[in-house]
Image (cartoon, helix red, strand yellow):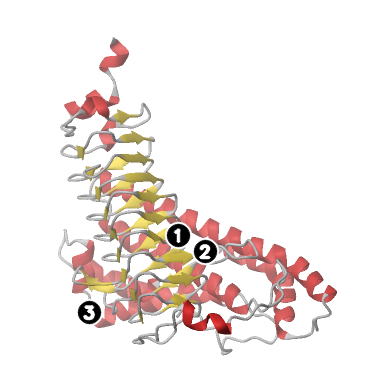
């Protein structure tokens, strides 16, 4: 009886957590009751587990369908309407509708989220980014927009293609970027529904991709509306069938460059959380838990991307063997790039392991921090960014961009320079 009286569910009720039918709610014994704020609403059928689970004031779980929540951190007013959520972090005002499947490495910032049946993993959504319904959007970062009324959006039935026929996942896509995206002053990006993005791809702010389009190339010039691809039925007669050998790569310059730029952006975001976000996420234990959660998510994403790039490097010897067996000229650019990745990977891996020691442009950082320090005490994160002067924003962007450039600059395959087509560090 004594054990039953200390059941976490009863402790939550005593703390003021609202559970309309508490007998249908499972609270794991590893959940720390103090990490669930008074006034949180947990609807029938929900399951909460994990000693890292933290749910802040005003949150609501399971309004549309049961929620399974494991080792997640929620800020204030987060609404998870139904689905499964594990090792993910949601900042103030984030929301996901029913049917969500959110896996580790996911960070959803203020007032961002998705409609029903959205799958996320190793995904980062900046403030205000909205995903429609029936979406698979794993292994990518998306930014853009200035408010809920002017936000980046992904249309319904969209997919980020993150697995190749060579069975590798060095495919993370950057939609927007960190150095400019964190300032919340960039034009939104629109990815139309019933479409897809083939990773690893970079798309800059202000891009519009019409519905029904499969985007396979980088879009590095802003303000463009891409021409919609023709329906498959109209091009069927032009379909070309060619020989294919699994594991036989061609040019890898763009793949490697985009992966390094992505890792550089993740590192820049980590430093942003350390030096800027931490100022605003130490207000109470629930915000503090979100800060710790964000650090964990970014570490997970960085480790995943380095792991996938290492796997790609490990496939290059077999690729060269296949090319030699097929009589290919191994002196041509694609195979020089592959040999370069084999030779340079140990150095590249060491450089990536040392990113936490890179500070970037300290002068620009200090200019931004000085501007933030002059704001009235208690200013919220979003209001603080809106209040920054253009010069402070520019300094912050330059600081973060310098961090990205360090990472992008560690890849110099034979015959390839920073000015070569397809290699635009930091864009």
Residue 281 position in % (x across, y down): 28, 54
Q: Secondary structure at mark 2?
A: loop
**Residue tagged by mark 1?**
138
**Residue tagged by mark 3?**
389
The vertical placement of 322 against 44, above or below, is below
Residue 367 position in % (x across, y down): 31, 75
Q: Is residue 266 visible?
A: no
Q: Secondary structure at mark 1?
A: loop
The vertical placement of 166 against 92, above or below, is below
**Quadrant of the image containing the C terminus:** bottom left
Q: Secondary structure at mark 3?
A: loop
Residue 278 position in % (x across, y down): 32, 57
Q: Give the CA distance from mark 3 to mark 2.
A: 38 Å
**CB contact under 8 Å: marks 1 and 2:** yes
**Quadrant of the image containing the N terminus:** top left
Q: Is residue 252 left or right of residue 234?
A: right
| Circle 3 residues within 10 Å: few <14, some 14–19, many ≥20 | few
The picture quadrant where one finds residue 40 is: top left
Q: Is residue 336 visible?
A: yes
| Circle 2 residues within 10 Å: few <14, some 14–19, many ≥20 | many
373 or 199: nearer the eye?
199
Task: Mark 1 or mark 3: name the one nearer the start of the chain.
Answer: 1
Task: Mark 1 or mark 2: name the one nearer the start of the chain.
Answer: 1
Residue 320 position in % (x across, y down): 78, 72
- Marker disc for residue 162: 2
Q: Is residue 2 left or right of residue 164?
A: left
User: Which is closer to the viewer, label 3 or label 2?
Assistant: 2
Task: Mark 3 or mark 2: name the one nearer the start of the chain.
Answer: 2
User: Which is closer to the viewer, label 1 or label 3?
Assistant: 1
318 or 311: nearer the eye?
318
Taking the spot 59% from the left edge, 65% from the top edge, the residue there is 164
């Amino acid at each position: 009886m004594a054990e039953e009286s200390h059941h976490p569910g009863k402790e939550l009720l005593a703390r003021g957590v609202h559970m309309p039918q508490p007998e249908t709610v499972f609270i794991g014994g590893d959940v720390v009751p103090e990490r669930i704020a008074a006034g949180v609403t947990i609807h029938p059928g929900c399951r909460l587990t994990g000693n890292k689970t933290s749910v802040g004031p005003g949150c609501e779980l399971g309004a549309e369908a049961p929620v399974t929540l494991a080792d997640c951190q929620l800020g204030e007013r987060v609404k998870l309407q139904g689905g499964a959520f594990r090792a993910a972090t949601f900042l103030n005002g984030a929301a996901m509708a029913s049917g969500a499947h959110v896996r580790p490495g996911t960070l959803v910032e203020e007032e961002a989220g998705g409609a029903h049946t959205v799958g996320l993993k190793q995904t980062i959504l900046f403030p205000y980014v909205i995903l429609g319904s029936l979406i698979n959007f794993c292994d990518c970062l998306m930014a853009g927009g200035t408010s809920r009324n002017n936000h980046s959006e992904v249309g319904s039935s969209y997919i980020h293609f993150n697995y190749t026929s060579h069975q590798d996942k060095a495919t993370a896509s950057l939609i927007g970027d960190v150095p400019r995206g964190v300032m919340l002053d960039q034009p939104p990006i629109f990815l139309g529904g019933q479409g897809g993005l083939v990773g690893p791809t970079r798309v800059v702010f202000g891009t519009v991709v019409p519905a029904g389009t499969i985007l396979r190339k980088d879009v590095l010039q802003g303000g463009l509306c891409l021409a919609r691809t023709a329906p498959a039925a109209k091009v069927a007669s032009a379909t070309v069938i060619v020989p294919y050998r699994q594991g036989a790569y061609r040019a890898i310059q763009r793949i490697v460059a985009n992966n390094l730029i992505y890792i550089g952006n993740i590192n820049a975001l980590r430093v942003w959380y350390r030096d800027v976000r931490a100022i605003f996420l130490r207000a109470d234990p629930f915000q503090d838990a979100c800060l710790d959660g964000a650090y964990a998510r970014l570490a997970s994403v960085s480790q995943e991307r380095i792991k996938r790039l290492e796997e790609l490097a490990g496939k290059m010897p077999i690729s060269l063997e296949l090319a030699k067996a097929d009589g290919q000229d191994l002196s041509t650019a694609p195979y020089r790039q592959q040999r370069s990745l084999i030779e340079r990977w140990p150095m590249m891996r060491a450089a990536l392991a040392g990113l936490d020691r890179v500070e970037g442009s300290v002068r620009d950082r200090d200019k931004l921090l000085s501007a933030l320090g002059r704001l009235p005490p208690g200013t919220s994160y979003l209001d603080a960014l809106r209040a920054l002067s253009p010069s402070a924003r520019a300094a912050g962007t330059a600081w973060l961009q310098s961090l990205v450039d360090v990472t992008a600059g560690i890849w110099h395959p034979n015959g390839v320079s920073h000015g070569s087509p397809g290699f635009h560090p930091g864009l």
